[in-house]
Amino acid sequence: MKTYEQINERISSGKAVVLTADEIMDYVDKKGPAAAAEEVDVVTTATFGPMCSSGCFLNFGHSKPKIRMSEAWVEDVKVYTGIAAVDVYLGATELRHGDPANMYHPGEFRYGGGHVIEDLVAGRQLQLFALSYGTDCYPLREIRTYFTIADLNQAIMVNPRNCYQNYNVAINDSDRTIYTYMGTLESRRKNVSYCSAGQLSPLLNDPCYDVIGVGTRVWLAGAQGHVYAEGTQHAGGCERTADGVPKGGAGTLALTADMKQMRPPFVRGVSLRGYGVSLALGVGIPIPILNEQVLKRTCVRDRDIWAPVVDYGTDYPQNTGRVIAHVNYEQLRRGEIDLEGGKVAVASLSSYYKALEIANLLADEIRRGDFMLAAPIAPLAKDKTMKPLLVRGKS
């Protein structure tokens, strides 16, 4: 048994043994789980891909004269102003003003909230336009100015739902091409898409939430942040394998970090044809090897992780709950799966290459003593299920 304090002492002294989730499996096969649990202090996990439930709080400071922004746009992308005078929240999926959306289907969605966030982190100059109804204490009714992230008092990423533990494999059973947040799906099962780093993914290396919880320190696009709550739609009470690995979406994390410390390659705006805009993020989470059981769970392999194949032509939009089949990530990463007697081409919305880069960057930071571990202050719920929205009349 080890404690967080003991592991952090080893990190501070430069003696910590840190491996990535990609490396730990072969290491345990060679050393054995008992010996490896004694030797290894931390296993780093990571993921990189679109995470729609993301956004940021920005504080502009006060102009002369002052304004209480009641409506505002950054690069013509609307931000939420229903908070304090010069605080706004920018959502990753917000569209640019005047975007035709899907008026001429499928829309292109060239620029939106995710792209603004990318531009902010990259240090680009952006335009703020804001309106106000005017008050005695905030008399200015309109302002237009240009700024960069360096001009802001705060730029804090606050993401309600990141790092889905597992996810659907999307397919299209209909006779027409469809455009979804899982990408373009051709008719009659010509292709499937998925979005997960599989054996590298944080919550798949801690499937029962033994070490990741509220307060866990995370690497969010290069900045040191933390888990501030369970993510929205967190639903740990799902079907699992004998080893506890969920066979569906299951857990999620709510994450926050200082955008001024983030690295541009790991914050990228995304345009999804026919669907909208999003934000691709890189997240790394260290797993402290407190005991042999925690270590064994980090040895999960792609072949052990099963994801549901769901029809996005009918079943997903109609919320039927039907699952066509389950496939594992080893099969998906080959680029082709066998499904009910037919071969189907596979594409991934996430990047294993970028996830592995993040896992290695985080491991290096820990080895240098630049990234310390933080014990959770509260666990994630293990048995929660997701409620549907019921359409009903007033009672």
Image (cartoon, grey):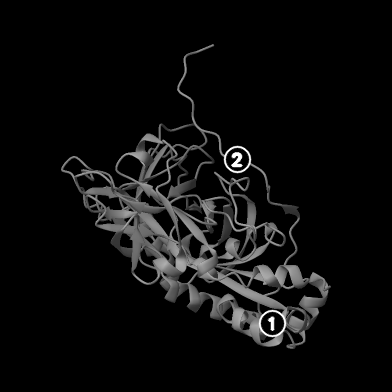
Q: Nearer the viewer, residue 315 or 197?
A: 315
Disc 2 crowd, CA 10 A, few/some/many (<14, 14-19, 20+): some
On the image, the x and y values in percent for residue 183 come to: 30, 55
In this view, the residue in front, 293 or 228, is: 293
Quadrant in which the C terminus appears: top right
| Residue type, mark 2 in image | Thr
Height in image: 2 above or below 29?
Answer: above
- The structure residue drawn at horizontal position 29% and vertical position 57%, both measured from the top left corner, is 271
Residue most extreme to the front:
341
Please tell me the numbered disc located at residue 369: 1
Q: Could you tell me if residue 137 is visible in this image? A: yes
* Residue 141 image point, x, y percent: 38, 37
N-terminal of the pair, mark 1 or mark 2, is 1
Instruction: Inspect the image, locate mark 1, and give the three-letter code of the amino acid beneath it.
Output: Gly
Cα–Cα gap, marks 1 and 2: 39 Å
Query: Which quadrant, please, contains the N terminus?
Result: bottom right
Mark 1, Cα crowd under 10 Å, few <14 / some 14-19 / many 20+, is some
Which mark is on residue 206? none
Q: Farthest residue toward the left?
A: 104
Q: Is residue 160 left or right of residue 149?
A: right
Residue 376, image quadrant? bottom right
Q: Image point 76% across, 72% down: which residue?
A: 292
Question: What residue lies at 71% left-to-right and 62% top-to-bottom?
Answer: 211
For label 2, the residue is 385
Q: Secondary structure at mark 1?
A: loop
